[in-house]
Amino acid sequence: MKFFYFLFLFILSCKSDHENLVMEIEELISKEKYEKALDLLKERLSENRPSAEIISKSKPNQPRIFQMSEDRRKIVWTENKTVFYKDLITDTQKNLELKIRPELLHISGNAEFAIIQYPLRQKGGCVIYAYSLLNITVEYESAVHIPCKTGMGISPKGDKIFYFFENDLYEERTSHPKNPKKIISFDQFPPPFPKLKTNLQLASIGEDWLVWSGAGGAYNLYLYQSQTKKVQLLSKDVVLPKITYNNGHSGYIVTGKIGDLYLKEIEYSTNRIPFLGRGIPISTREAYSWKLANKDEFVTGNQNEPLQPMKWKVLGKKEHLPLFLERFWVVDGDRIIYENAQGELILDQLNFSQEDYIMLDYYKKVKKSADS
């Protein structure tokens, strides 16, 4: 009897971890212990893979603010009162200790400078600071206090900051003496519905700026050219006040209306008016998509629990990727940065093994049985 017991243990030891897990899942399914099987599968699909790089093991008290450069090769994020910078190509890393946790953070298009809002507890509103992320001794405090969450930006050289004050666009050099200047009046970028409280947001595209003016899911999108200081309407019927950067020369915006959405590419370069593409019809969940290297291929979230990345292609199939996570972003080289259940920040590839897909198929099968 002992011989057969040890033989069984020997056979188990010869099997891979994957094969042993499959055996355990099959046994649990046969006994209809679906919840236990789901727990094991969730754990397997959530674990860090051998290809993963742990960027941060910390779990901040508050959600990270995460930003990336226009070419998606540099990333900046916050953890409580610390700002971290990482170049994904050279692996250069910096960190900046702040006075208090920021209310809002935006970075320059090259990710070398940051503009930060700190809340004013007594007076209300926010104070603005500008920082160099490569030279942590460089700091500038703006002369103006603005409502928190108001749109703002910082130039690629860090020598100018831009922000909205009383709905007008201001420019301020990050040097003394402090001299904020109103450069564009609100009437030059009117919203679609003037009677509603207007949300004004900024995003850099090279040396120039996109300006969103609107509320809810209805915005007008304008171009502000830094050299000429001119404003031009680029698009109406913009749904989200955001751009998803691609390669340093293009990005994507969402236009249309709820139930009739389009993902439009915006191409830009120095001294040229940006070009807006015709647009790709998308669903609501595809509004937050990142472009992959292959033509017309994107990644978005599945909007279900647990959250998974979902690869989709224009006029093609949608593919749920075998990875469970909390939040994610897609960076240069078709790589993913995500937060796992432990709050770690992970960098990984979007390549998956056959074993990964087998585990996902098991999860779908067991979930269906558990729900029936």
Image: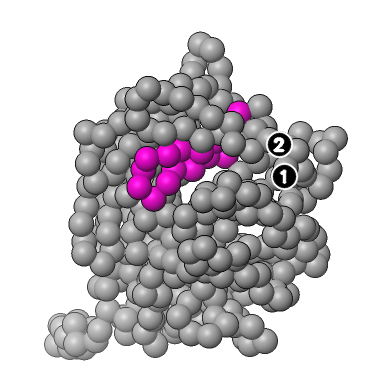
Residue bearing the label numbered 2: 186
Q: Position of residue 336 (x, y in %)?
A: 40, 67
Most distant residue in the top direction:
122
Query: What is the magenta range?
Result: 151-165
Q: CA distance from mark 2 to mark 1?
A: 6 Å
Q: Amino acid at mark 2?
A: Phe
The residue positioned 25% from the left and 84% from the top of the image is 16
- Above-or-below relation of 240 to 195: below
| Main secondary structure of the magenta stretch | strand
- The residue singled out by tag 1 in the image is 189
Tell me, yes or no, whether the two marked residues, 2 and 1, touch with CB atoms within 8 Å: yes
In magenta segment, residue 159: yes
Choose between 189 and 56: the one closer to the eye. Answer: 189
Query: Which image quadrant is residue 90 in?
Result: bottom left
**In the picture provided, is 282 more to the left or to the right than 322?**
right
Q: Position of residue 353 (x, y in %)?
A: 36, 84
Residue extending farthest front: 228
| Image: 272 above or below 185 | below
Residue 23 falls left or right of residue 296:
left
Q: Amino acid at mark 1?
A: Phe
Residue 220 seen in the current view: yes
